[in-house]
Image: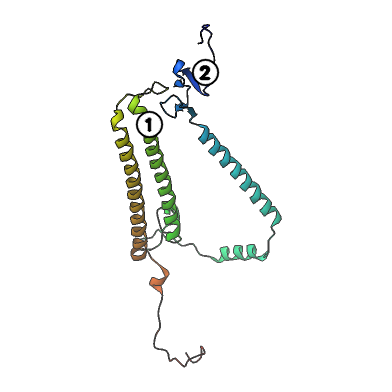
Amino acid sequence: QDNAQVCHACPIVGCETCAGESGGCEACLIFHIRSSSEADGQCLFLYGAFFAAAALFGLCFLLLGMLRFCCLGLSSARAPGVLREVLAHRRRAKVHDYSLPGNPFYSYDDTSVRRQSISGVAPLLYFRFVAFLVLLCFVIFLLLLVGLLLPQLSEGDKGVVPLPKALPKKNLGAAETGHAIALYVLCIIIVVHWMTNQNRTVKHDVEEEPHLRNYALVAEGFPKSARSPHEV
């Protein structure tokens, strides 16, 4: 209100209640959070980044789908007899039951590329790497959110989610330093743990899983002068 007792709209975007003559915003609208508790603090829209990420993902998905459709439409079969040979081989092939006791391979219905070395250890390591990235991003997001809320905890916040004044202002600097150290240390621990698990997975695959090299024969002792299969 001004001297004539006339209400004016708050000049801060996303603000629900202005702080009065001191300026700034006292409470933000729903889905908004204050950037700082100072007079020049702004109200930030929390879900703007999520909407932008969803729109970018949808656009990339659409472009990749169109590219795949165009590539398939322009491509042609270079070897038409391949399908005929595949069907002939399928008729000649015998059915193998890999679920019998003592068989070193996996049965078809019990396989999982994400947990078992079906086609090599590379797909297994890749899925573990994707899970590691998801976990690391989630942990960093939570820790950054905690760091964003530290100033509000030191002064209290009366916004959409009221926060208590649980942290004295004199300890705010120490809390931010400890938060930064904890962020880096926890990320390093997660990375080292992932590297250890990857190494353990490769070691288990080499020592325990069946490989073609386990069934290969190495012949030695042939004369060095042998150059043709007949001489060998």
Give the residue drawn at x 46%, y 20%: 23
What is the x, y in percent for residue 66?
65, 47
User: Which disc is residue 149 wearing?
Assistant: 1
Residue 81 visible here? yes
Above or below, 92 against 146 in this view is: below
- The residue at the far front in this view is 3
Residue at which label 2 appears: 10
73 relative to 132 in the view: left or right? right
Q: Residues within 10 Å of mark 1 (few under 14, many from 20)?
A: some
Nearer to the camera, 148 or 71 = 148
Q: Amino acid at mark 1?
A: Leu
At label 2, the amino acid type is: Cys
| Displayed quadrant of residue 19 | top left
Identify the residue at horizontal 40%, vertical 72% (top origin).
213
Determine the secondary structure under disc 1.
helix
Residue 53: percent from the left, percent from the top? 53, 39
Pick the residue in front: 21 or 204: 21
- Residue drawn 38% across the image and 71% down it: 214
Whether residue 19 is visible: no
- Which comes before the other along the chain, label 1 or label 2? 2
